Image (spheres, coloured by chain):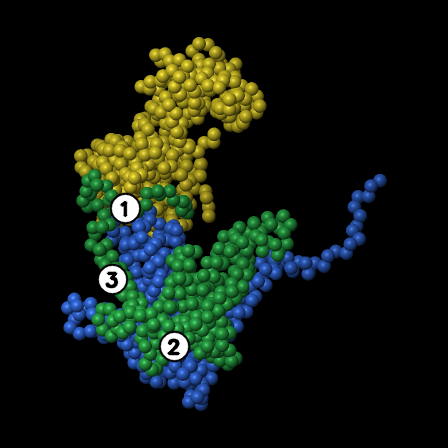
Chain colours: A yellow, B green, C blue
Amino acid sequence: MSTVTDTTLTPQPSGGTRAAARDRAGHFSELRLSGISRAYGAHVALHPLDLTIRGGEFIALLGPSGCGKTTALNSIAGLLPLTAGSIELDGRRIDTLPPERRGFGMVFQNYALFPHLTVRANVAFGLKMQKRPKAEIKQRVEDVLKLVRLTEHAHKHPGQLSGGQQQRVAIARAIVLEPPLVLMDEPLSNLDAALRLDMRAEIRRIHQEFGLTTLYVTHDQEEALSLADRLVVLDSGHVAQIGTPAELYESPASAYVAAFMGYRNILTLTVDSVTADAVRASRGGISLLGKPSAGASVAEGSEVQAAIRPEDVRIVGGDGADTTAGHSGVFDAVAEIVEYHGRTFHIDALTAAGDRVHLRTDQRVAPGDPLRLTAAAERVLVFPGIAPLPETGADE
Amino acid sequence: MSTAIVDPTAAPAPSTGPQRALPHRRSVALRPGTWLVWAVVAFFLINLFGVIATVVLDSFGRTWFAGWLPKGYTGSNYSDAWSEFSLGQVMTVTFELSFLVVVVSLLLGVPAAYALARRDFPGKKAVMLLFVLPILVPPIAYGIPLATVLYKFHLAGSLTGVLLANLVPSIPFVVYTMTPFIEQVDPRLEAAARMCGAPTRAVLGRIIAPLLLPGMLAAAILVLVRTFGMFELTFLTAGPTSQTLVVSLFSAVFSAGIRSAQSIDAMAVVYTGSMLVLLVLALRFVNPTQLVARTRD
Amino acid sequence: MSTLTTEPSVAPPEPTRTALRHRMAERGVDRTLLLLLPGVVAVIALFVYPFVYGLQLSFQPQGVNAHGGVFASYSAFFHDKFARGSIGTTFYLAIPASLINVGFAVPISYRMRSDFRGKRLLLTILVVPITLGTVLTAEGIIEYFGPVGWFNSTIQWLHLSNHPLTLTNNYWGVLFSLIISGFPFAFLLTHSYLSGIHPSLEKAAATLGAGWWQRFRHVTFPLLLPGLLTTFCLTFVLAFTVFPSAMMVGDPDGKTHVISIEAYEQALQKFNYSQGCAIAMVMTALMFAVIGVAMALRSRLYTGSTGGKG
């Protein structure tokens, strides 16, 4: 089967269709989730979650598998009953409604395309359930198929399509109803890397053009950061942080969130001294000056986790870094693995105490080279306590 | 098409939360359709239980002509049945036969399954069709011509004849059970064994056979259960000394003359008990559907 | 000075013989196929040969029909009203039984498609009548549904009837027997097919606005139908070839004189092997006709993957 899919953006359908679609789309001003929670017997899959989604927002639920994000999504869809809490759409309680009456669109991780129906029949299914007139169904289906560029495949069955094409059918099927809220359950996780990037752009484009409100579940922080207006990071059923991509990127609320946001270096250190806006902590040959996370109180002698992005770890003497007062302390490590990435090298280095440090540099480094490393104090985030970290899938 | 599913949240469970009631919620307990379904299932199970229980109770009863329960209980029906129907001999024949059928069908079926699993050859479809027919065609349809042939060769009436007849559905059954099982065993294991210097004997005996053991065990038990309960083939080909328990039971019920219903039921209970023991044994190795499903397309 | 290449003094290998063995091995034909031989021979000797022999014998009428020509066995069967009627009798039993078994299996397995506590126990209980077999079931039916059995006693106790219903030694006894041993079979098969339909399909339909009946009608049922047709075929075959219960709990010389009884009586009681085999052939042909129709219907449906565990 051909795996080449047309990934170039073709000219958009006429503005008239889109404007009309936007006008038809059920807009709402807010969807309020109040304390929604779900438990299976003694095990709580989702602790009470409060979130207010404004119409037109793109919200990402981010976290590793088992963190409760799929549970949250299924509860909002109505596929799972809530054990506590309520969901209100512009003041109207909808958590008592079954999924077929909530009117939300949903894209499933495995697409869940009806295998016995053609692409056209799949996309038309929701409209058929609404008992729309035939002509209207035909028109709307054609418009959406044009939008996702599947018109020439419309007569085929899902089994005859590639993964990317199936995914577009799934999206088309959900949005043709112009629902007030579109739920997406890791829709890109089954696609290969190149396709994923293209489809990501597609999804954002469709979201903007149709003026949709989207709730998107993923475990990929890069995806979440690039797509979302706001992110909700979940940890074992608890909300770790809610914020914009910038907020999460710059000011993660905990080491867990930091690890998720790409702060690959999480070092466990003991506090030496604390000042108003800085903390010095050290262990095993590493001594760092860092910035305590907002609102956290750190006591001398306590254990903390210091989070540093690989881009912020610098080699002393190169990259223009030096050891002047504004910077953290210096520590030594030996380069172990050097990956070539074109303009930069990604380096895994080991300190004498056995801590692993990830960094990026333009300098040519060979495995076994001793390195002197440092990081700017405001780039080192210090979090109190030792928190379990998510398995982000990135190697240690 | 991707079928990898991450759906830790299974189908909706009945609302367990005492926090608040959910009107309109599709709760399993409340819908009339569910009540109806469960009522039908319960009705079926009650009658099923009644059918079996009647036989069991009657076998222990002194007399039972009317009323809800027998008048008095005794175990003498069992001893009566034992002697009257020569149950000792019948049981021996039954187990001998079943055992032989299992052994022979495994001996013939497993190698055939191996060949089918490992090789794709011209005519494979024909061979698979050949093996599926005795499973699809019901026993009585081929049993009558088969009985005719066995009578022609003077094999009918003897244990050999009954054995041959019961092999017909059993060998294909072993083949069809074992072939997918063997397909699941990575052929590269055999290649690896050969690369380590093992001759064919060792490859089959030390590598393949141990891996196939669970499958063979499952197939053996399934054949055992089916042969034990196989009526038509044995009925058509057995003689007075080569009847299995189920055929004896039938003959007792259907033969002319006044037979004590209680001792017949005693024999029926012996049959049921043996079968249930086999069933329990079987279910430790296979799931309920495998006992039932013949071929699935 | 080194010699470059010297002509090998070995004779070239005989191309034909080696090539043939390798060519055959490439097509999958090698010594491993010998493992097939015993099994294939056994099945041919014990199944194909008797069947062909029986077919051939059916065209060699014996006994009273010996001089009636090649088809005498068949025509004797079709001309005798009672014998011929066995076909209708058998259909009259098999079709309702199959329809009831499959018809009830569908809604019940649909309702039970999700997992619940005790499901495995229930499935195990349902396997019991199948494994016990028709003989045991028939024996139980004789007493349970008999005039003084528990069923009739309960009916009268509930004042649903004033006198016992005649449910044994007639059509009803055999029908009950077919249902008791046939329904669990149909249920387990249907349940198995149903679990092969991925649950996310129904969930997707729900999010698209389909209520439970619409989900069943537009998504589940179309995907289940091919499996249902197969189940119907298998159930029908079981019912059509009913034998011991038709004798034990039916009326074998009258209303439940099914075709298998007719064949049996001809072959092993009247020793008219030719006619017995002829009737067996007719029975087989009729069965394949029904199966053929069902499978033809089935081939027009979508029978591809439905994504589930199967």
Residue identified by numbered label 2: B84
Q: Is residue C79 visible?
A: yes
Of residue B162 and residue C34, the one placed in the foreground of this image is: B162
Left-right relation of B167 to A118: right
SS at badge 2: helix
Q: What residue type is labelled 2?
A: Glu
Chain identity of mark 2: B
Spatial CA span between label 3 and label 2: 36 Å
Q: How crowded is mark 3: few (under 14 residues within 10 Å), some or many (20 or more)?
A: few
Measuring from the top left, give residue B156's x and y in whole percent: 48, 78
Q: Which amino acid does label 3 sit on?
A: Phe
| Pointer 1 and pointer 2 on the same chain | yes
Q: How crowded is mark 1: few (under 14 residues within 10 Å), some or many (20 or more)?
A: some
Q: What residue type is labelled 1?
A: Ala
Residue plotted at (25% across, 51% down): C212
Of residue B270 and residue A205, the one placed in the foreground of this image is: B270
Measuring from the top left, give residue A12's x and y in whole percent: 34, 37
Residue C159: name its quadrant.
bottom left
Spatial CA span between label 3 and label 1: 25 Å
Q: Can residue C98 be seen in this view?
A: no
Residue identified by numbered label 1: B13
- Residue B43, which numbered label? 3
SS at badge 3: helix
The nearer-to-camera label among 3 and 2 is: 2
Q: In this view, does A16 lie above or below C229?
A: above
